[in-house]
Image (cartoon, grey):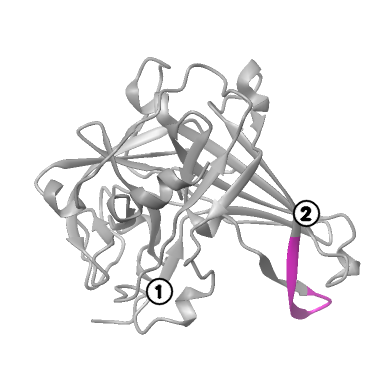
């Protein structure tokens, strides 16, 4: 197997010294959800997570901020699942030509039912709180023997809590109580608010894509989807899968939530155009999900 680089599928916007650095892409090869009556719309949401830089760590940054864009899925009234890596506690920032680790503070999570500029629901609501899985380590890529197919559990799952009702009538999706392998002969639907091309500047509307099961990973929790080459991923023709901004979005089979979009190959291996997406299984975390209120 050749060296494989990793790509986390959140999207960030970082403003430093009046220069904005963008990382951006989306659901690849899918369809736009055009009606609020479509089932995919009823449970998928968009998250905008804004944080300030610690003035103690980097007073030079002043009031500049960091924004992370992810997707999420409604699983009960007031509870949304998403990816844990959408909530970094710090960031490596280049300041005056040197890299510095800066803590992130004062997190504000805005939840959008729909993303369409100029419409009433564009403003979204403010979430009350969030909880990442207690065993999630945001530095996990440095602490596992193989970050592409780890034997260790990654636990890339988080819960966003809100008391203010979402715009439109969102319907929670049912959590699957079966291992993801039992669905291996089914079609998996991914949905999210990420980007759909490398050249796209801003987030687009909700999209979905239907793809096939590929394999369960060595840790028996994460799983790969898509018809790309898992052992040696690279860019392919007619790719399908998740990308930047889709992190935390739902992976659904037969109207059951079986997983969350997590990551994929890095740029050197075709990134979002490799037709390989990795998800986090829901089944092992059901007890934890239900314990959080």
Farthest residue in the left direction?
A: 185
Between discs 2 and 1, the one toward the N terminus: 1
Magenta residues span 95-104
- Say what secondary structure mark 1 lies in: loop
Farthest residue in the bottom direction?
A: 145
Taking the image as shown, residue 58 lies to the left or right of residue 182, namely right
Percent of width and height locating residue 185: 9, 46
Is 100 magenta? The answer is yes
Percent of width and height locating residue 226: 23, 53
Residue 252 in the image: above or below residue 67:
above
Q: Residues within 10 Å of mark 2 (few under 14, many from 20)?
A: some
Taking the image as shown, residue 128 lies to the left or right of residue 289, namely right
Q: Residue at x 28, y 55 (%)?
A: 275
Q: Do labels 2 and 1 touch, CB within 8 Å?
A: no
Q: Residue at x 85, y 70 (%)?
A: 58
Q: Nearer the viewer, mark 2 or mark 1?
A: 2
Percent of width and height locating residue 206: 45, 31
Please indicate, yes or no, whether residue 119 appears anywhere in the rendered image. Answer: no
- Say what secondary structure mark 2 lies in: strand
Is 190 magenta? The answer is no
Residue 207 in the image: above or below residue 41:
below
Distance from disc 2 to disc 1, alpha carbons, whole Å, reads 28 Å
Q: Which mark is residue 65?
A: 2
Percent of width and height locating residue 208: 34, 35
Taking the image as shown, residue 10 lies to the left or right of residue 126, namely left
- Prevailing secondary structure class for the magenta stretch in the rendered image: strand
Which quadrant would residue 115 be assigned to in this image? top right
Quarter of the image that includes the N terminus: bottom left
Residue beneath label 1, please?
5
Which quadrant would residue 19 be assigned to in this image? bottom right
């Amino acid at each position: 197997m050749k060296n494989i680089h990793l790509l986390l599928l959140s999207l960030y916007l970082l403003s430093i010294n009046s220069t904005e650095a963008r990382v951006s892409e989306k659901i690849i090869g899918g369809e736009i959800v055009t009606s609020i009556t479509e089932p995919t719309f009823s449970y998928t949401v968009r998250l905008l997570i804004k944080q300030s830089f610690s003035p103690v760590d980097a007073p030079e940054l002043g009031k500049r901020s960091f924004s992370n864009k992810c997707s999420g899925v409604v699983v009960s009234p007031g509870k949304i699942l998403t990816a844990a890596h959408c909530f970094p506690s710090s960031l490596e920032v280049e300041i005056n030509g040197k890299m510095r680790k800066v803590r992130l503070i004062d997190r504000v999570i805005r939840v959008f039912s729909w993303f369409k500029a100029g419409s009433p629901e564009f403003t979204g609501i403010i979430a009350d709180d969030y909880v990442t899985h207690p065993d999630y380590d945001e530095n996990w890529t440095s602490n596992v023997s193989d970050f592409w197919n780890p034997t260790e559990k990654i636990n890339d799952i988080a819960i966003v809590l809100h008391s203010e009702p979402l715009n439109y009538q969102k319907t929670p999706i049912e959590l699957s109580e079966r291992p993801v392998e039992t669905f291996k002969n089914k079609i998996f639907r991914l949905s999210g608010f990420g980007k759909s091309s490398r050249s796209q500047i801003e987030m687009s509307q909700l999209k979905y894509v239907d793809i096939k099961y590929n394999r369960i990973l060595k840790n028996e929790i994460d799983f790969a989807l898509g018809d790309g080459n898992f052992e040696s991923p690279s860019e392919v023709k007619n790719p399908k899968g998740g990308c930047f901004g889709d992190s935390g979005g739902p992976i659904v089979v037969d109207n059951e939530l079986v997983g969350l979009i997590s990551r994929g190959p890095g740029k050197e291996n075709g990134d979002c155009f490799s037709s390989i997406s990795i998800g986090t299984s829901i089944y092992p975390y059901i007890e934890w999900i239900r314990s959080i209120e």
